[in-house]
Amino acid sequence: MAGRAPTPLILAGSRKKPDDAAITEALALAELFAAKKQEIATALFDHFEPYDEAHADGKLSAQEIFEPSEFQNMLLWTIYFWLMALLVGVSAIGRVYLFFTRQIVTAYDLIESLTSLIAVVGLFGFAYQTPIAAPTFWKVVWVLLMLTWVWSFFGAKNVEMIEKTGLAKGATIFSLISMLAVPALVGLCIYGFRSEALWNK
């Protein structure tokens, strides 16, 4: 195309020769591009304009516009949210049942489950990029979640589990639980502390 670097062109056809219709379309491509150039430019501008307005309002940095966001792929977070929603939901129901039937669950266990359920709501907001409540609220939830996690590490139940199963097996179990919990702490930290653009919507 005139004024531009050579562009490779691949045409459909057999091993012997390109398709005649493809050759005809290729020859007309330069003229078609010239006719559609203004339309293409307008469409590109319409796509970019909201980002330009957000940048002018201070809601979006130039780096966020022109570079891929480090959190742009939310699919894994969505999968993680549903996994945690299932695990925390089942755990909370089981704890409530045991609390009223066998009395082997303490009030602290119920508070821990309540905190986890609230955290799951925050994970939903982060995974689906939806502002829920206020960032200050999720900062408080993050601190509470961190405290309950640290407390469970040194808690009597964890010590009892290690005594019953042995140090190696107990440490393995706790490590697996931690592997599931740490992403929740990371997600809520990003949601409450580092999602200014989301909260400014």
Image: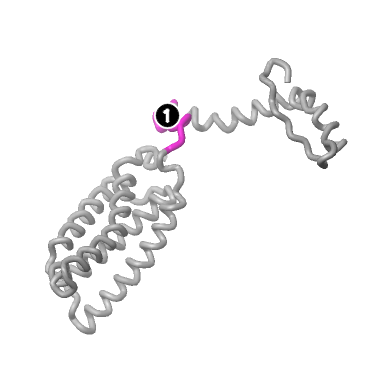
Q: How many marks?
A: 1
- The amino acid sitting under disc 1 is Gln
Q: Is residue 59 magenta?
A: yes
Give above or below for 138 relative to 105.
Answer: above
The x, y position of residue 115, in whole percent, is 25, 61
For the view shown, which residue lies furthest in the top direction?
Answer: 3
For the view shown, which residue lies furthest in the front direction?
Answer: 16
Q: Quadrant of the C terminus?
A: top left
Residue wearing tag 1 = 63
Give above or below for 110 relative to 48.
Answer: below
Q: Quadrant of the N terminus?
A: top right
Residue 10 placement, left or right of 73: right
The x, y position of residue 81, in whole percent, is 39, 58
Quadrant hosting residue 164: bottom left
**Mark 1 packing: few (<14 Cα in 10 Å), some, or many (20+)?**
few
Q: Which segment is the magenta one?
A: 56-69
Give above or below for 35 relative to 121.
Answer: above
Give above or below for 179 relative to 40.
Answer: below
Q: Is residue 195 magenta?
A: no
For the residue labelled by badge 1, is the local secondary structure a helix, a strand or a loop? helix
Quadrant hosting residue 55: top left
